[in-house]
Image (cartoon, helix red, strand yellow):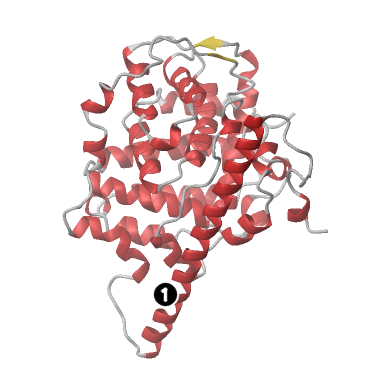
Amino acid sequence: MNETETRGRKKTNIQPASKKQAQVRAAQRAFQDRKRLHVERLERRVQELEAENAALSLANKSANTPAFCANCLAPIHAVPTQPSLEQMLGSNLLQSPLASDNMAYAFNHVVGMDSELETSFMSNPLLKSASAELSVFSLSSPESVTHTLTTSNPDDWLEQDSNGINEQQTRDSTTDKSAVEMFGPVHTEFARYILNTIPSLRNSTYARQLLDLFEEQASYRDKAKVQRSMIIFMQIWAKMMEHCTDPAERRIIYEVDEIFHEVNRDHMRYYYALGAKAAEKFAKSQTGSVLKHTAESESLRRTLHLIPSFQNAGNLIDELCVVYFQSSDPKWSFFRAGVLFEKLQDMCTTSEDRATFLAVLDNLKFQDLDRLHEAVSEMALEDK
């Protein structure tokens, strides 16, 4: 029997134990249906684009800009019609009061914050038209989105473990194979082209360094080397975002990042799984903690709560605040932040919410990444 047919929670005729459980299951099934319809629309769009591409090839026509880049390049060559991220993240957002401002939030660092997450809609960000157009160039991941949505049980989300990594990914992270050997090569060509068209990045090497590093780490069999490369990756990303200050240009980077995650889905899940393992290793010295309200933590907490997709993400947001502002262990903080980032990113149901989330984090300054890289390099991150 195919492994995908046996994965996840099995269908059952047993009635839900409570009304709340029934509502959650019904909501999840409805959400899966919406995802399926969305993918079907994308596939129809792909077929249309394939036909157009074939016609252009026969007519021997060429264009300076590939069709799949048009959606991403438009904000650069024209004034954006939608509010910029800078406006969306203005000072007014930070002044919006929340009813739960005076509450304390306790949780355990090691176990994680997934109790409330089980009642939320876990999903990957919805693909935009640009990602659909990429399929014309055969840049899709080995397992198609349609196959994932149509063969999975609507209740699969109930089987997620405390770190948000499914059993298959956990098994993959214990093998001696590299990501390239398991999933094939990383698709970076489209990202290189689009990022090189951004004015702020044309004369810099940040985009090339990022993509070269991701391709290189995907060939590593040594998990410790992959984990150390994560810190270098964030160093380069931070420098690139500091160099690119135009909100319209940043939005293009976020769109490219979303598409990159989709077409390299298996690589990204494996990448995050290795980061989660590092977080578990460094979590041995961590104890339970309570979020202490400071000006910095409140600013981050309120801003993230205003993102529509994060209505049920209170515990994850509070833990992220602790990771950024209260932890004394930079190694654990860095890798635990990656785990929380993946969970919150997966909760984003629109590209707009995901871009806003990334913009919020890019405005934060993580601890000294150079010092962190030296500390992690000295430690053995190999699995025991």
Q: Closest to the observer: 264 or 21?
A: 21
Which percent across, then down, holds residue 213? 48, 47
Q: Around disc 1, counting alpha carbons within 10 Å, would you say few (fewer than 14), some (14 to 19), or many (20 or more)?
A: some
Q: Closest to the observer: 31 or 180?
A: 31
Residue with the mark numbered 1:
49
Q: Residue furthest left?
A: 79
Q: Is 329 located above or below residue 66 in the figure?
A: above
Q: Residue furthest right?
A: 1
What residue is rendered at 64% in x and 25% in y?
280
**In the rendered image, which quarter contains the N terminus?**
bottom right
Quick one: SS at disc 1? Answer: helix
**Tag count:** 1
Would you say 66 lies left or right of 117 here? left
On the question of residue 94 being in view, the answer is yes
Would you say 363 lies left or right of 228 here? left
Which percent across, then down, holds residue 288? 59, 11
What residue is rendered at 58% in x and 32% in y?
119
Q: Could you say which quadrant of the image residue 170 lies in?
A: top right
Which percent across, then down, holds residue 42? 47, 64
Which percent across, then down, holds residue 17? 73, 30
Q: Could you say which quadrant of the image residue 142 lies in?
A: bottom right
Look at label 1 and name its amino acid: Leu
What residue is rendered at 57% in x and 54% in y?
33
